[in-house]
Image (cartoon, rainbow, N blue to C red):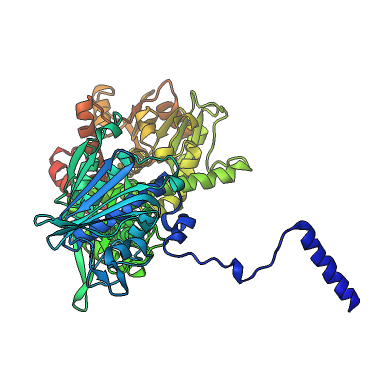
Amino acid sequence: MAKNGDLFERSGGKRAATGKDSSYTARDIEVLEGLEPVRKRPGMYIGGTDERAMHHLAAEVLDNAMDEAVAGHADTIHLELLPGNKVLIRDNGRGMPVDPHPKFKNKSALEVILTTLHSGGKFNSKVYATSGGLHGVGVSVVNALSDEVTVEVARDRQSWTQSFSRGKPTSKLKANGAAPNRRGTTVTFHPDPEIFGKQAFVPERLYRMARSKSYLFRGVEIRWKCDKSLLKGGTIPEEESFHFAGGLKDYLVSEIGERPTVVPQPFAGEAKSETNGTAGGKVEWAVWWPNDEEGFVRSYCNTVPTSDGGTHESGFRSALVRGLKRYAELTGNRKGSVITADDVIDGSAGLVSIFIEQPQFQGQTKEKLVSVEATKLVETIVGDNFEHWLTGDKEAGNVLLEHVIAKAEERLRRKQDREQQRKTATRKLRLPGKLADCSNTAAEGTEIFLVEGDSAGGSAKAARNRETQAILPLRGKILNVASASADKLRENQEVQDLIQALGCGTGAHYNDDRLRYERVIIMTDADVDGAHIASLLMTFFYREMPKLIENGHLFLAQPPLYRLSKGGRTEYARDEAHKDELVRDVFGGGKIDITRFKGLGEMQSVHLRETTMDVNKRVLLKVDVPTSSDADERRLEMQTRTLVEDLMGRKPEKRFAFIQENAKFARDLDV
């Protein structure tokens, strides 16, 4: 017992020596009354004490005014920045109640609202069906964090005023007399320097806040005003009135301005959802796709901006990708299967606004919506309307689909390039096993021949100049990239071998400096099948490596179709007409030994060399894309793209129409 007592005494003696008492008793429990919790921990209510948080005070008061407008009781709101870092917000709504509160006989309802947390009319859906304020803390937080607050109410043809400071009233509710032609609430406040220091309101930020609120509810006009001394040469006006009768669509059109877009008009609209005969929510949306892909996605709930998105934004993304995929299925475009929400949304300019009862936000600052029902609401309404919009204007639908598919394929190319880079970071790049490479390592003066099959490849290898000429045999007809999905493109071995052999990448990742050969030569049989293979290869380069063509690297070899011999003379004819010309003009008729080559694989290497591969004797056709002046360039590019799509795309009826229109020009058919 003595030892234990000694221990206690030593311990107690130590506390006495340090002068610190670590005990924890009822005396240590603080009870914060009124609005003291807000002043103690402002970050819990407005996210901090920085400039953004201070502007959130104005947003809270403006949200209350907007709730009056959305409820149908106000149509005009004033937002004014006054000298001395004061903000005035006025609406022409019903006005805050000023009669005594049932639970606080000596206080008016106005004073209760301004000085008590979790008080207000937003808890009762009969007063506000939808609202941005939910917790009854907004305007009371503004009062708690301001050293000057004045509230004026015009209601029932009378006017009242009361003043507050740091959460407490500094005056009684005062009757100002008759106000027969006025109604609504005016709140003027000055942020407390003890909380926010010397920070000042930024006119541009408040101006944008006022403008954004006006397009979220087309039934309200918001009037902006700023004291001239506060503008300091800025670009915003001293006074302006905002009213977007077309809602989000009007705002989006004004934001995009003259910038070119993928489709002529935005996809926009609004609709309500009904649940058991009662309102289940309302959704308004507008989305456009600018060509420069400098876009944005902004979401709102009950006019409150949700900068971190949330469930309504997730539903918006799902609706757009679902609608576009279904449209791809409807039009038979299998490439649509690779589309993701990012392909549709990234680079777009999109707005989505919902109105629902009792939304749930993450935190008091309402930066993220977490209401589960919002996802289905938006996905259903926007998704159904998007599908109708796409099918209602198929020309715009097809253009948008092709635009998004191109983005998806580019994304997959980047992924493939990253994977390839990871593979080659630790080991030397492997060239295709079928490639017979040339000995020169520099691209200058070298060329690669693309031939059909191992037989033709064998003849070409024997006929080549090993120092400068490489041979890549391709098995059969290469994949038609104009109608193949991105998955098939990645999985096709012949395509991947070709990309790997050239080494320059594809799409936006094409790099001319990495091209391993100066010339890429398509060398196929001089017959219909050979021409088809050549057209497939040209389509591949046009779609996947257009810069290779533009920079003058692609050529067509001209192998002969006939060999003509008479006496000691031998000539080669490239086609039937050329053969007849040689028979008539060179050999002068008579008995001529004529051999028709079945293909490059049937030619002796010596014949292939002297007719097609010898740089001093051969003829090459350069593949080019027509160009013109700047005014005509776009038109020519579109004509070329359309022709390639018609002849090589997925729609056989377009090829049939082309044949019908051009059959009369056909001569010397090889059938």
Up the image or down, 456 lies above or below 360; here it is above
Compared across the picture, whether 192 is left or right of 356 comes to right
Q: Nearer the viewer, residue 567 or 129?
A: 129
- The extreme top residue here reads 616
Asked if residue 214 can be seen in this view, the reply is yes
The spot of residue 422 in percent (x, y) is 57, 45
Q: Quadrant of residue 551?
A: top left
Name the residue at 22% across, 35% down.
237
Residue at 15% in and 51% down: 246
Q: Quadrant of the N terminus?
A: bottom right
Q: Residue furthest right?
A: 2
Return the residue nearer the eye: 97 or 297: 97
Asked if residue 394 is positioned above or below residue 644 in the image, the reply reads below
Q: Of residues 435 and 292, which is closer to you in this image?
A: 292
328 sits to left or right of 25: left
Q: Is residue 338 visible?
A: no
Depth order, front residue of 246/124:
124
Estimate the x, y position of residue 442 in percent, counting from the top left. Answer: 54, 26
All told, the count of numbered labels is 0
Q: Position of residue 488 (x, y in %)?
A: 40, 54
Q: Position of residue 295 (x, y in %)?
A: 32, 44
Tell me: 668 left or right of 40: left
